[in-house]
Amino acid sequence: MTTVLIVEDDPQMARMLGELLEFEGYRAVLCPATERVLDCVRETRPDVVVMDFHLGRVRAPGLLQALRADPELRAARVIIVSGDDQEVAARAAGADRFLLKPFAMEELLEAIRELIHSESGRP
């Protein structure tokens, strides 16, 4: 079963994404705290990480750079989502995909499918 790790500081949004992904047949895992993102990736070995750009005082690019710097985790496929157009910053940090909120669930599902079916995750 394909595992999707959700990194979102809004608990309601995280639960909603998790429920929708599980309804679509994915195993959704919610990362409980932004300071645990690397541990969550290490523990769950997700096929795809869906990460909000703004995570309280933390920003996804810093987390993503740390993830890409870790030899054990750098291959993780990451989709960054944001209500602001942060695609340039997200891609510069190493995101595989970027989705602007609000996005249709089908857009997220398509991005996940593309990443799990591609060799490296990156286009």
Image (cartoon, rainbow, N blue to C red):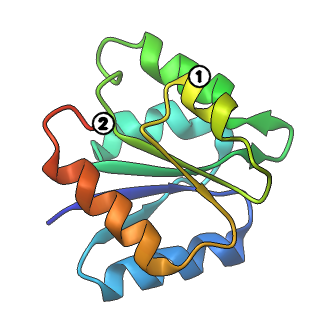
Q: Is residue 42 left or right of residue 93?
A: left
Q: Is residue 55 left or right of residue 60?
A: right
Figure quadrant of residue 22: bottom left
Q: Nearer the viewer, mark 2 or mark 1?
A: 2
Tally the numbered discs. Answer: 2
Q: Say whether disc 2 or disc 1 marks the residue closer to the N-terminus.
A: 1
Sort mark 2 into few (<14), some (14-19) or many (20+) by Cα contacts within 10 Å: few
Which residue is identified by label 2? 123
Specify the amino acid type for callout 2. Pro
41, 80: nearer the viewer: 80
Which residue is identified by label 1? 92
Figure quadrant of residue 90: top right
**Residue at 78% of width from left, 35% of height from top?**
58
Q: Helix, strand or loop at disc 1? A: helix
Specify the amino acid type for callout 1. Ala
Sort mark 1 into few (<14), some (14-19) or many (20+) by Cα contacts within 10 Å: few
**Residue at 29% of width from left, 84% of height from top?**
24
68 vs 84: above or below: above
Q: Residue 18: where, in percent of width, then height?
A: 47, 75
**Residue at 44% of width from left, 84% of height from top?**
20
Q: Are marks 2 and 1 in contact (CB under 8 Å)?
A: no
93, 69: nearer the viewer: 93
Q: Is residue 89 left or right of residue 92?
A: right
